[in-house]
Image: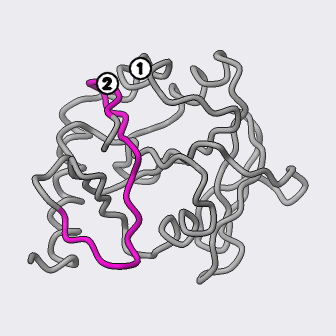
Amino acid sequence: MTDKHQLRAAMRAMRKRLAGLDAGAAGRAAEQADALPPGRIVAVYRAIGSELDVDALSLALGRAGRELCLPVVIERNAPMIFRRWSPGEPLELDEAGVPAPFPLAEIVEPDLILTPLLAFDAQGGRLGQGGGYYDRTFAALPKALRIGFAYAGQEVERLPVEAHDIRLHGVLTETGYRAFA
């Protein structure tokens, strides 16, 4: 089994390369928004570094009548909360240093959580940054659909999965939506 630290480093480099090769990937992924499973409240994220940008997808989801929210880290070792958000609304940095809605925004529970990732596999495995924020949140919200948002090139044959790792229900890439069994 590959060491997760080494795998993360390799997949960060791969994602950065993919981001540099295909500036239109986020737009093509957004065109697939209608293929996502139903859900009235959808959690998106603010892309950092080479993460696939969700701006175009957020706009497409809003046009389709879906309500949006963003994750907020209020405590480092606790599940994230979600605050209602619309594209263009101001943001501030949360406890993890990630842009998030102001505390005045309503706290909501998403039906569908779009998550960034470093790698995924066909079994729904997800390799994140290693902070555990999404796994803790997935465990706290078991009814929410967990959908990765990534470049198709981030797929690997099989990821090492540990007991605390929670599998995705599907993934949306620039080539379309795919549900996992």
Identify the magenta region.
159-178
Label 2 Cα neighbours within 10 Å, binned few <14 / some 14-19 / many ≥20: some
On the image, the x and y values in percent for residue 150 come to 33, 42
Reply above or below: 81 against 149: below
Reply above or below: 128 against 29: below
Q: Give the residue drawn at x 35%, y 79%.
A: 163
Q: Give the residue drawn at x 34%, y 49%.
A: 50
Q: Quadrant of residue 88?
A: top right
On the image, the x and y values in percent for residue 11 come to 19, 59
Circle 1 is placed at which residue position?
A: 32
SS at badge 2:
strand
Task: Residue type at mark 1: give it.
Answer: Gln
Query: Which badge, 1 or 2, is on the more N-terminal residue?
Result: 1
Q: Are marks 1 and 2 in contact (CB under 8 Å)?
A: yes
- Quadrant placement of the N terminus: bottom left
Query: In the rendered view, does 46 fall on the left or right side of 10?
Result: right
Which secondary structure is most common in the magenta stretch?
loop
Reply above or below: 100 against 58: below
**Foreground pick, 48 / 43:** 43
- Quadrant placement of the C terminus: top left
Q: Give the residue drawn at x 87%, y 50%.
A: 106
Label 1 Cα neighbours within 10 Å, binned few <14 / some 14-19 / many ≥20: some
Task: Residue type at mark 2: give it.
Answer: Gly
Residue 100 is inside the magenta segment: no
Circle 2 is placed at which residue position?
A: 176
Query: In the rendered view, does 32 fall on the left or right side of 156?
Result: right
On the image, the x and y values in percent for residue 152 come to 22, 36
Reply above or below: 97 against 78: above
Residue 177 is inside the magenta segment: yes
